[in-house]
Structures are given as C-alpha cells and as structure tokens.
Image (cartoon, grey):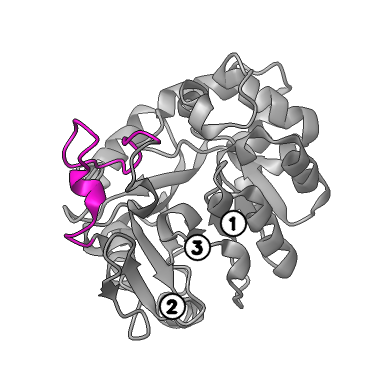
Amino acid sequence: MIINTHIHMATDNHFYFYPHFQLRQLLRDQQTNAITICLVCLNPKLSLLQCPKDCSFNCPMVSCHPNHNLQDCPSSCPYRAKHRMQVREDGIFCKTCGNLIWDISQVDPLRSFNIALIEQTKPIRSFIKPILYLSLANTSIQREIDFFEQYYTGEFVGYKLHPWTDQRKVSDIHVHTKLPFLIHTGIRKLESPANAIAFAENHPENAIIIAHAASLKEEFLKKISSTPNVFLDCCPSNFLFSHKEECLWNKKVTSSKEIYEIALSYLSSKKILFGTDSPWGNTKKEIDTVNSLAISTTEKEDIFFRNAMQIYELNI
C-alpha cells in the first residue's frame, strides 16, 4: 500500500505552470504507479493571482518569456525581489506595481478552486482526498476554514499553506481547527522551516507536516524530532537533489536516497510521510528511492502509508 500525501492538481486551465496536470493525468499517474490513495491539493501557480504588470512574466534579463518559474532571472536582476504577488491582511497585491489584485476581505480567491477540487474528485473520494490550499491572511483564513468545515465536512482531510507563493510567514497565522496542515518550506527566509515549527508550537493540537525535508538543516531536523505534532516529507527527493544548490542547506548530498538517509538519522520512520510533489516530482523515482533504503519493511510501511493513515485519520 502507498499513500501519496503531497501532490498537486490543476482544476482547469487557469494555472500558469503545469496547467495540463489535471484529474485525468493524476489518475493515470496513480494507476501506473499503484498508488492506493492520493492526498491532493491545488497547484499553487494560479494565473488569477498574477498582475499583468508583474515584471516576472516579461523580465528583460531572461530568455524565456514568460518567465513561468519566477526564479529564472539571474541574481543581478533588479526586479527579482518583485517577481510575484504578496498576500497581506488587507488583500493580495502585485509586488511589481503595488496594485491590488484581490480584496481578500470579501472571500479568498482560492475558495472557488478548492470547491472545484472537491467536486471534481468527489466521485472517487475513496482514493482521492483533497487538502485545501488557503491564503495566508488572518482576515480570511479562519473564515475559509469555518466555511469548508461547515459545508464540506468529510470531503477533505487537511490544509496546505505555501509561504513562498504568498510571500508571508506562516508563523504570523493563527487558526482554530483540528485538521492537519501541510506546509511548504525551503531555504529562503519567508519559507524557513523555523516559521513552520513556530506555527506548530502555536497549534499543538494540529499535526503539522513540513514539506521538502526541511531543506536538510540539522537544527530543524532535531527540532522536528523533539516536537510531538511535527512530521516531515522528503519529496520530491530527486528534484531536491538535482537542485540542491537552490533547495538544500546541505550541499554535499550525493543522491536522492541520501536525503532520506539524513532525515532518518535524526527522525524515527514514524515521523516521515511519503509524497511526490507531483507534477514537480516523479512518482516512480520517489517510490524507488524509498524502496532502496536499508531499513526494515515495517519502517518502509511507516513511510509509505501507516503514518499518513494515523495523521489524516484515513479509513481503508
């Protein structure tokens, strides 16, 4: 049995990166790789939240236009720090021109996309379970949680927070819910695992899954080990290894397998969940990486499905 706890899906063509990876492609990937259950959240690259004046789409210092990845410009690019939108308490703003993109006091723009994710996957709920992606604003996030827990209870299993996309620290956010949170982390200040751990300490009743191996920084792996409600995924390990200069504090790793090995040197197998971060990650390669680890069958089962069943309260 394998439960993929970290996978993204576009609900329509209103996404500027991997818009083609929709339900049909997800199901094909799931069936090809014998995945039992997918915990699916929205693709965070929503065209709706991009201002036409955002210079990242036509950055003068890149050859690729539009600059879909928003990070392809060189460090010398004077626009680099403005290459995205930013969630604030009063709305979502363009960092290039400062214009208001969305008045978040009315409704989170992600709501309709989360509803689409729920509705599209509802006929196959036994093996596709949504994780809802929420904007990082205290003015809206609790309202969204309350809305979905009132009207869609049982149709989703947790929430996803993405501090780099939102350009906002998760440690600034305070919510009330009993469901788990999957939190994107990386080596940049806003997405630091330190912020996700602080969020976890402020929400001791919630299971917090820190994504992307906490970028393999020792102090964070130690903290995750000693914090009861905090867990880790190491996906996409192959992508992280291939882009270790941009993704990992530990630049000396020699393989995707070593990412898991380092994590396991600090954490019990009961602290690690399997995921792929598809379409950014390759499902087969992620499965092969876990299967190649020199650990017991029981420990592999912890990673592949047992931990997810407990944390997300899945009945199979």
Q: Using the image as rendered, state which of residue 81 and residue 213 is in the foreground.
A: 81
Q: Is 257 contained in the magenta span? A: no
Query: Which numbered disc covers residue 168?
Result: 3
**Disc nearest the viewer among 2 and 1:** 2
Whichever of labels 2 and 3 marks the residue nearer the N terminus, that label is: 2
Q: Which residue is mark 2?
A: 144
- Residue 16 visible in image: no
Q: Which span of residues is magenta-colored?
A: 51-75
Residue tagged 1 = 312
* Residue 260 picture location, percent across and down: 64, 27
What is the CA distance from the residue labelled 3 to the residue labelled 1? 26 Å
The number of discs equals: 3
Element assignment for label 2: helix
Residue drawn 45% across the image and 59% down it: 167
Q: Position of residue 304 (x, y in %)?
A: 59, 35
Q: Secondary structure at mark 3?
A: loop
Disc 1 residue type (three-letter): Tyr
Instruction: Establish if 258 lies above or below 30.
Output: above
Q: Is residue 51 left or right of residue 285?
A: left
